[in-house]
Amino acid sequence: MKVRFDFTEGTNLEWALHDTLLEFNGDLADCMVAVAANADITFKPCQLSSPAQKALEREQAAVEVDLPEFLRLLCGMVQIIDGHLRIMRSRSEPQTILDLRIVDSSFALVETEHRKVLQAFAARLGGQRRT
């Protein structure tokens, strides 16, 4: 199923995603997260940046990380302005669990067959209209 979330006021998509992934951590523990190239992501200033954070922030390179590393990245994010994230079962089993496209921080397109994950994510988003 595909859902479009239009952001009608301030929302914290990054925290909604983080908390949703934490809720399903047991089921998603072995998943991989792919962030497509040219993602426009702002991070909080920090003294020690991971290689993945440096690649996303400075080079806008494509990055593939495991779920624990992605959760750490989400904790350091201020905002995803534009980006495409795909959570896959594993490298060897590329079944997509969640496909998220954020477009100029005004709306997001979410595609998943996991209704519970979608419901948990939607419940955590504030300031949005779902279509």
Image (cartoon, grey):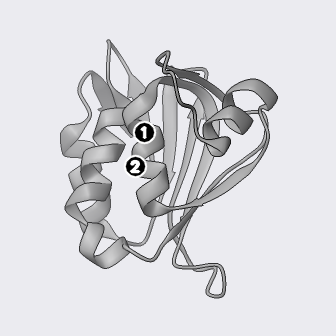
Residue 82 x/y as whole percent: 63, 28
Nearer to me, 47 or 27: 47
Q: Residue furthest front?
A: 47
Q: Residues within 10 Å of mark 2 (few under 14, many from 20)?
A: many
Q: Residue at x 81, y 30 (%)?
A: 59
- Give the number of marks: 2
Amino acid at circle 2: Leu
Marking on residue 120: none
Nearer to me, 111 or 26: 26
Give the secondary structure at mark 2: helix
Query: Which quadrant of the structure image shows residue 119?
Result: bottom left
Residue located beneath label 2 in the image: 71
Give the secondary structure at mark 1: helix
Amino acid at circle 1: Leu
Q: Are marks 1 and 2 in contact (CB under 8 Å)?
A: yes
Query: Which quadrant of the structure image shows residue 60?
Result: top right
Q: Is residue 103 visible in the rendered structure shown here?
A: yes
Query: Which quadrant of the structure image shows residue 1?
Result: bottom left
Residue 101 x/y as whole percent: 58, 42
Q: Residue at x 42, y 72 (%)?
A: 113
Q: Quadrant of the C terminus?
A: top left
Q: Is residue 119 visible in the rendered structure shown here?
A: no
Measure the C-alpha gap from mark 1 to mark 2: 5 Å
Q: Residues within 10 Å of mark 1 (few under 14, many from 20)?
A: many
Q: Residue at x 18, y 43 (%)?
A: 123
* Looking at the image, residue 47 lies above or below residue 29: above
Marking on residue 74: 1
* Looking at the image, residue 110 lies above or below residue 93: above
